[in-house]
Image (tube, helix red, strand yellow):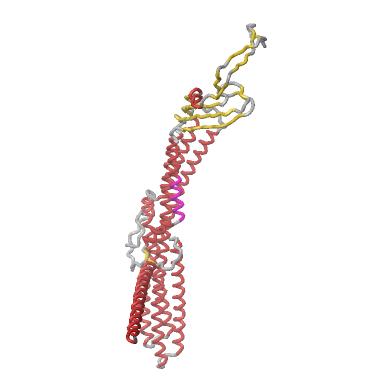
Amino acid sequence: MASTARVQILNLVQERFEVNQLKLISILFLLLLFLLFSIRVNAQETKEWSLEECINYALEHNISLKQQDLNIDYQQELLLQSKLGVLPNVNGFISHGYNWGQRVDPFTNEFATDRVRSNNLYVQGDLNIFSGLQQINKIKRNMLNLQAAQYDADYYSDEISITVAMEYLQTLYYLEFVDMAYNQLDITNQQVDRTSKLVEAGTLAKGDLLIIEAQQASEELSVVEAENNLALSYLNLTQLLELDTPEGFFIEKPELGLIDQPEIFTPEQIFGIAVEYRPEIKSAEVKVESSERDLGVARGTYYPSLSLNGSIGSGYSGANYLYNNPTLSLDDEPFGETASNEFVFPYEVKFESRSSKAFGDQLNDNLNESVSLNLRIPIFNGWASRSSVAQAKIGIANADLELQQQKRDLYKVIQQAYNDAVAAAKKHKAADKRVNATQESFNYSEQKFNVGLINSVEYNDAKKEANNALSELIQAKYDFVFRITVIDFYMGKPITLER
């Protein structure tokens, strides 16, 4: 008995161990899946966005651009409707009603006093044959309006692209500025450690250490400010992209280095290229043509219009009776005379029974068809046509002025972009020279400070000068890249950081 109990206990322990082992394996498997999922999510969240990806995403999700797409759809519908407007208009009509009281039945031409049911059915159509070419001008005008809407959408796309590029470069600038701030802080930290040891050894006075530590605190503040500016720049960029949050959003950091300064075309050369393809110019040109078509539509009201109309219809009346065995009886006494002195005797129709004529028979009996040509000749309409023509001419003049203004605005923008690019190129070149000079000066000052030939104040002055020069170089570099990008943009080149 004891051995049997022992065996049962061992079996029970083994079963529980196997169950626990399975549970442990299941838990480990779930943990492994969770870790793999987390790694994948983190990899997705830390994806670095290129400039091209940012621009494409912004174009896909920007609300203003979606509104422009809706405007294109709206213009397409107007164009379709104007094309279908050359087809005939066909309308059907069906009525079903009852009448009480005396009236003349339209189908029997007799007085009806009882309740009478009536039905009317007809189809009517008309075709505009000629109306001063108004419909053709409307079609061409709507085609031009559709082109203008597409050009407007392209203009919005370009504006969004250049804005994203500007904010992208701004973010790159702050990324590099943060790295520079950390590098400078690291150099100062090392100098603090070195100075502390020299002070402990009695080589330098404690005042030198305090000055270096003050510089350390100042550079720590610069790091915080740089990181705040970077965070704000990321926020601005993600808002342009219509992202919900900047968390997990990072951009690629292409190695720009020192930028070779390309030949910059003159404003006249840039404008000569831009004016041929810029969407805002094309849109203004198309709108001038559209306003000329409006004038054609207005002038069409001066001409006669010719239309073809046709209809077919029938009806039913409950007062249209069929009489069984009708008889006619005349009274003996006349109630009047005709113009030829003939007596008129009243009569009475008698019948055994009556019933309304069948619906189908009445439709055949009452069938009527008509065809007509209608010529409408305008004689006087309160000067409405003349006023419409005058308004259309004003619209043409206004559209032409808008085209001239767009060209002038474009030339002004190109002039400004050219001047900015030239200035940025000079500043970039000068900043590069200054960095080389101040860095050599700082390296020399650092060596002198380490051997005690200069004090901490002179050392800090040299370091600040080098820091300022490096900061100006970074700013000048990204400003120059953006200005060159704008020039390329107006010359029809794609927006890219690859040079």
Q: Is residue 71 magenta?
A: yes
Q: Quadrant of the C terminus?
A: bottom left
Looking at the image, the residue that sits furthest to the bottom is: 202
* Residue occupying the point 57% across, 16% down: 326
Magenta region, residue range: 63-74
User: Where is residue 444 drawn, in percent x and y?
Assistant: 35, 81
Q: In this picture, is 271 found above or below 455?
A: above
The quadrant where residue 416 appears = bottom left
- 117 sits left or right of 462 in the view: right
The quadrant where residue 57 appears = bottom left
User: Where is residue 357 drawn, in percent x and y?
Assistant: 53, 24
Q: Main secondary structure of the magenta part?
A: helix
Q: Is residue 242 magenta?
A: no
Q: In this view of the protein, can residue 448 be seen by the observer?
A: yes
Looking at the image, the residue that sits furthest to the front is: 1
Closer-to-camera residue (151/217): 151
Closer-to-camera residue (30/257): 30
* Residue occupying the point 46% across, 34% down: 134
Q: In this picture, is 110 found above or below 426?
A: above
- 335 sits left or right of 175 in the view: right
User: Where is residue 241 drawn, in percent x and y?
Assistant: 43, 61
User: Where is residue 114 drawn, in percent x and y?
Assistant: 62, 26
* Residue occupying the point 63% across, 29% down: 100
- 40 sits left or right of 108 in the view: left
Closer-to-camera residue (117/42): 117
Q: In this picture, is 350 found above or below 189?
A: above
Q: In this view of the protein, can residue 428 be seen by the observer?
A: no
Looking at the image, the residue that sits furthest to the top is: 341
Q: Quadrant of the N terminus?
A: bottom left
Closer-to-camera residue (430/484): 484
The quadrant where residue 457 appears = bottom left
